[in-house]
Image: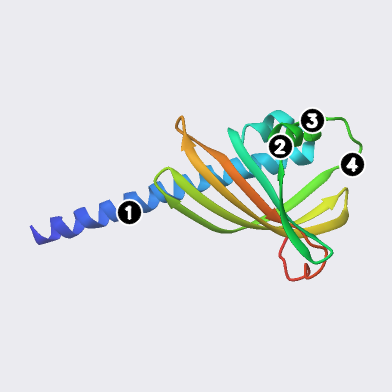
């Protein structure tokens, strides 16, 4: 009987781990769709990553004065889908993913390139919610800088 109890606990532990890995991969896929769409000019793919009511913000450092600027999701999506000759390539590394049921927090370091020319680096902080049985970005805030980027991996 003791062996069956140990086996049952092991199977429960294993299934929980596998479920968490599945959720983490689903979350990474959503975030990756955002940046793949941005790079290829596919606004539909990028839009699919976001909840309709998503809030997008950037921490701006202008003349050593910090502020938070809110951007409209529709404007961002329109920009992605508008014809442009440049390729916008945000290269990310997933640093941390935390999940609690239908809520996830994702932290990514990034370097941003226009075509192959380095533009800036920073971090993205995403909040995702599992709505209608799929992960969606409900909040995104990022930092942007041009210095201290060499230590960042992308």
Q: Which residue is mark 1?
A: 14
Q: Which residue is mark 2?
A: 72
Callout 1: few (<14), some (14-19), or many (20+) C-alpha neighbours within 10 Å?
few
Do we see residue 50 in this rendering?
A: no
Disc 4 secondary structure class: loop
In contact (CB < 8 Å): disc 4 and disc 1: no
State if disc 3 and disc 2 touch (CB < 8 Å). no
Task: Calculate the distance from the C-alpha at mark 2 to the C-alpha at mark 1.
Answer: 42 Å
Q: Secondary structure at mark 2?
A: loop
Q: Which is more toward the observer, 125 or 91?
A: 125
Is residue 86 left or right of 131 when viewed as pictured? right
* Comparing labels 2 and 1, the label whose residue is closer to the camera: 2
Which residue is at the far right?
A: 85
Disc 2 or 1, which lies upstream in sequence? 1
Mark nearest the camera among 4 and 1 is 4
Q: Position of residue 85 (x, y in %)?
A: 92, 37
């Amino acid at each position: 009987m003791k062996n069956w109890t140990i086996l049952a606990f092991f199977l429960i532990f294993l299934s929980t781990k596998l479920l968490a890995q599945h959720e983490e991969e689903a979350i990474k896929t959503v975030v990756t769709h955002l940046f793949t769409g941005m790079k290829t000019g596919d606004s539909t793919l990028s839009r699919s990553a976001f909840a309709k009511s998503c809030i997008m913000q950037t921490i701006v450092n202008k003349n050593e004065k910090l502020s938070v600027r809110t951007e409209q999701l529709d404007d961002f999506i329109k920009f992605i889908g508008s014809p442009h000759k440049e390729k916008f390539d945000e290269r990310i590394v997933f640093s941390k993913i935390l999940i609690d049921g239908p809520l996830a927090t994702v932290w990514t370091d990034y370097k941003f390139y226009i075509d192959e020319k380095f533009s800036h680096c920073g971090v993205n902080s995403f909040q995702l919610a599992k709505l209608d049985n799929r992960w969606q970005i409900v909040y995104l805030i990022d930092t942007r800088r041009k210095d201290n980027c060499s230590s960042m991996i992308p």
